[in-house]
Image: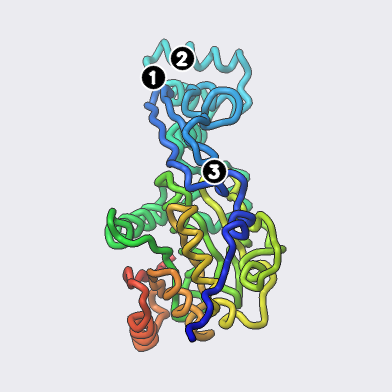
Amino acid sequence: MSPQRPHLPNQDVESVLPHDVNQARAGNGNGNGNGNGNGNGQARRNGNGGGSATDAGPAVADRSIGSLLAQTRNLGAEQVERILRHQRETGSRFGEAAIALGLASADDVMFALAQQFHYPYAPEERRRANPELVALNQPFGVQAESLRAIRSQLMMRLFNEGQPRRAIAVVSPDSGDGKTFFAANLAVVLAQLGGRTLVVDADLRHPRQHEVFGIGNASGLSGILTGRTEARVIQQVPGVANLFVLPVGVTPPNPLELVERPAFGLLMRELLTKFDHVVVDTPAACYGSDSAVIAARCGAALVVARRNKARVATLQDLVANLAETPAALAGVVYNEF
């Protein structure tokens, strides 16, 4: 007699999703603009193509650089006129003229351009609150560029057209390797491609994604896996319309048993129907076999090891353990940040 297949009702999955995700996977927002601040773009919302990028008023991509800078810097009409006059006299762009007059910074201009191009870029106050999100806080820096290079490799290895849908588990041999930092920022650079991206904190032993993103952790994955009714536990990252986080919630006493239950694998499959990319944080391998179990349920794994710290033998053991699971091993990343 075969064991009964576990049942995770679709409405249970729907209930944990934010309102604008729970109907269907939506299309990617797109937009274009130029250095003069002229651009157009639309974004599909709520699973259909009828909505604009904002619920009211002109879409961000339809607004000029001048309008965005005036809002960001609280520029008055007289200051805007000064910039326009300087722009006409020098033949420069609005942003360049604002910088030359000391009415805006280069960072202000980049932030306005990022809004036009639908490129997630954290405002200054968010950067102080979430310093570990370097791909969001400093998207033009060395660390972000390294993350984008890894993203490109993953897209070619795991997410080509025709390949099966997979979530990607980020695993590491030891604590302190930077796995949580890497998983969070990998999710940011994936979201910057335009697709809906979800970070699942499956580190049921030492959860930290809620701290990295600055969100609540009252309820989350542990509650879902134990069958407790918890609505809207998936939270949208402020300022990034297509990036979401499922925190752990209450840290359970039986983390390995929860992820070994069939319900976890079923949940992952359901989430892959709602999101374009799912990145899963896991406990370090030194704490047990959780990471290998989670990777098997996700379908793919990426190993992160701390440069000049990780031992070769330990890393080889982890890779060998993952090779015995159904997960596709995407590669090993040496973290030096």
What residue do we see at 51% from left, 68% from top?
266
Q: Are marks 2 and 3 in contact (CB under 8 Å)?
A: no
Q: Are marks 1 and 2 in contact (CB under 8 Å)?
A: yes
* Residue type beneath disc 1: Ser
Residue 284, how many percent across, how many down? 50, 78
Q: Which residue is mark 1?
A: 92
Q: Earlier in the sequence, mark 2 or mark 3?
A: 2
Q: In the image, 9: left or right of 119? A: right
What residue do we see at 57% from left, 49% from top?
22
* Residue type beneath disc 2: His
* Residue 214 visible to the viewer: no
The foreground one among 262 and 126 is 262
Q: Earlier in the sequence, mark 1 or mark 2?
A: 2
Between marks 2 and 3, how big is the CA–CA gap? 35 Å
What residue do we see at 35% from left, 88% from top?
313
> Dot 2: few (<14), some (14–19), or many (≥20) neighbours within 10 Å?
some
Q: Are marks 3 and 1 in contact (CB under 8 Å)?
A: no
Between marks 1 and 2, how big is the CA–CA gap? 8 Å
Q: In the image, 127: left or right of 156? A: right
Q: Is residue 172 above or below residue 158?
A: below
The foreground one among 192 and 252 is 252
Between marks 3 and 1, how big is the CA–CA gap? 32 Å
Q: Is residue 248 above or below residue 92?
A: below
Q: Is residue 140 above or below residue 68?
A: below
Quadrant for the C terminus in the image:
bottom left
Q: Which residue is mark 3?
A: 241
Q: Secondary structure at mark 3?
A: loop
The foreground one among 181 and 226 is 226
Q: Which residue is mark 2?
A: 86
Q: Secondary structure at mark 2?
A: helix
